[in-house]
Structures are given as structure tokens and as C-alpha cells.
Image: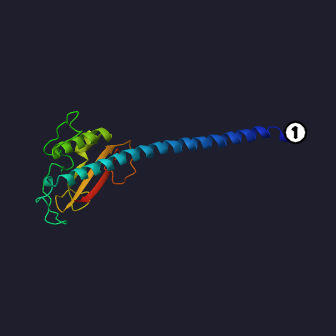
Amino acid sequence: MNNSKGFSLIEVLVTLLLTTLGILGMVALQSRSIHYTQDSIQRNSAVELSSQLIDMMRANPAALFDEVPPKHPTYGKLKNSSLFFKTKGNNFSPAPAEPASNACLTPTTAQQQRDCWIAQVKNRLPDGAALLTSQSYVCRSSVAGNCNNQGSTIEIQLAWQVKKDSCPDARAPNATTCIYRTRIEL
């Protein structure tokens, strides 16, 4: 019986060590889970905002097409410039106006719709105001990621701020910015 002195103490210490490691693993898992949930919320906002802009464009064909209504369903002659288009680093033209508090309830013109959409981007995406100018764009694009004002495809890119190196998208322009990109044929 003397040879087993302290054996129970070692068992307790090993159990305590294993329990502590398990708890630390769960805390790390919870931390990553929160990060991925936040990314999912922001990405979902970008998807929804992109979809809203696409719906606005479809509702206002005169702002996009050279000929309205289009000659046939596959008509793709888009205007070279539109109030919906903007390139990276520039603002929309005409410049967006800050909508009145109740103007976004029932916007009546394409420009009012666009300006209300811009206000939503600024409010819903982290650092949306700055990144709307510097990293976001809406343009004609024949090649993904290139606003070359050619073809009948419209590309929308929205960007938002994240913690350093926390964007899971390899296309992100830098370590603190995530992007969502949509390409559509109207």
C-alpha cells in the first residue's frame, strides 16, 4: 500500500490538465465561430445590397440601355455611362445627394433610388462610406475584375472593413478589406 502514495493526486492533476485543454479548445472554437458569423452577416448584407441594385437597374432600363424597350430579349447595347455606374476610386455621377429622412420610403426617380441605396451601403457595411469610393464599383465589364466599359455584362463589387488578415476571400485587395463581386447580364 505504501507504493501507491500520491497516485490519486497525479490522476487528479492529469484530469485537470486534460479538462483545461478541452476548455481552451472550446474557447478558441467559439472565438472562430464568432468571427465566421460576423463575416457571414457582412457578406449577406453585401449580397442583399447587390441584389437591390440589380433590381433597381432592371426597373430603370432607360438609365442603362441605348434603346428602350430593347429590340429583343437578348439586346445588350448598354450605355457607356449611367447614373448607376461608377469606377473604383471615383464617385457616382451625378454625385449622390444625402436623402431626406423620409425620402427612402418611396423614392420616385432612379437617382433617388440609387442615392437611398448608397445610404444603405454606408450604414450596413463596416467603413462602407470610404470603401464605397475607393474599392467598390459598378461598371460594364467583359472580363471579371476589370472595368473596361465593354460587353453587356455589368459587374458590381462591394467592399467592407475587417480585422487584419481575417477575410477568407483570396480576391481581397488588402489585409483589412473583404469584397463581394456579382456579374450579371440584364
Q: Residue furthest left?
A: 67
In the drawing, does residue 121 fall left or right of residue 111?
right
Which residue: 70% across, 41% down?
15
Which residue: 27% across, 41% down?
120
Q: How many marks?
A: 1
Q: Is residue 57 above or below residue 23?
A: below
Residue 96 seen? yes
In the drawing, does residue 168 fall left or right of residue 116?
right
In the image, 72 versus 97, the foreground residue is 72
Q: Which quarter of the picture shows residue 9?
A: top right
In the image, 149 versus 109, the foreground residue is 109
In the drawing, does residue 79 fall left or right of residue 178?
left
Q: Position of residue 64 (x, y in %)?
A: 15, 55
Q: Position of residue 20 (x, y in %)?
A: 63, 40
Label 1 Cα crowd, 10 Å radius (few <14 / some 14-19 / many 20+):
few
Q: Which quarter of the picture shows residue 22?
A: top right
Q: Quadrant of the N terminus?
A: top right
Q: Position of residue 21 (x, y in %)?
A: 61, 43
Q: Residue furthest top?
A: 101
Q: Is residue 28 above or below residue 100?
A: below
Q: Position of residue 140 (x, y in %)?
A: 19, 57
Residue 165 seen? no
Which residue: 16% across, 58% down?
149
Residue at label 1? 2
The kind of secondary structure element at disc 1 is helix
Structure colour scheme: rainbow
Q: Look at label 1 and name its amino acid.
A: Asn
In the image, 66 versus 139, the foreground residue is 66
Q: Quadrant of the C terminus?
A: bottom left
In the drawing, does residue 119 fall left or right of residue 35?
left
In the image, 142 versus 89, the foreground residue is 142
